[in-house]
Image (cartoon, rainbow, N blue to C red):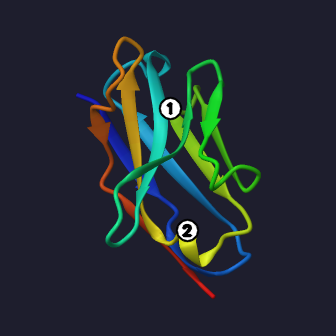
């Protein structure tokens, strides 16, 4: 069973940076695509960024140039570096995993709150 444990959220001011971490366990990490989603109050959950085991990434237009997703396959961990944070980045951020054989993210972390004040 895949388990995902997130950390690194918090309260920051606009323009600040945060780094979220997600530790993966329970299965072979390299067989999973990892993603970060976020959900703001009253809005649908959206994909922020994703990364394959080979390091190919996807970034949502809203975070391009500000957020960087990376993974350390030796530590079974993914990192979401968030720079130049804006109030509209305020949301609960969720780490998620999907096996390379499927298109659905089937495993989710508990979520970590990111709040950006203006």
Residue 72 x, y percent position in the rendering: 61, 32
Position above or below: 83 against 61: below
Rendered location of residue 84, percent (x, y): 74, 68
Instruction: Measure the alpha-carbon separation of dots 1 and 2.
Output: 26 Å
Q: Is residue 81 above or below residue 85?
A: above
Q: Position of residue 17 (x, y in %)?
A: 69, 68
Residue 61 lies, with reference to residue 74, above or below; the image says below
Of discs 1 and 2, which sits in the foreground? 2
Q: Quadrant of the C terminus?
A: bottom right
The secondary structure type at the circle numbered 1 is loop
Rendered image quadrant of residue 43: bottom left
Q: Where is residue 21 shown, x and y percent of the image?
A: 53, 51
Q: What residue sits 58% from the left and 78% below the top? A: 87
Q: Residue at x 34, y 22 (%)?
A: 27
Q: Is residue 62 above or below residue 22?
A: below
Q: Helix, strand, or loop for circle 2?
A: helix
Q: Which residue is mark 1?
A: 76
**Mark number displayed over residue 89:** 2
């Amino acid at each position: 069973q895949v388990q995902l444990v997130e950390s690194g959220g918090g309260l920051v001011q606009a323009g600040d940076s945060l780094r979220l971490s997600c530790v993966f366990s329970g299965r072979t990490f390299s067989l999973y695509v990892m993603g970060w989603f976020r959900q703001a109050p009253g809005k649908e959950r959206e994909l922020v960024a994703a990364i394959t085991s080979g390091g190919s990434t996807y970034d949502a237009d809203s975070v391009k140039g500000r957020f960087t997703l990376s993974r350390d396959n030796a530590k079974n961990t993914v990192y979401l570096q968030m720079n130049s944070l804006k109030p509209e980045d305020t949301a609960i951020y969720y780490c998620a995993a999907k096996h390379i054989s499927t298109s659905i993210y089937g495993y989710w972390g508990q979520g970590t709150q990111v709040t950006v004040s203006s």
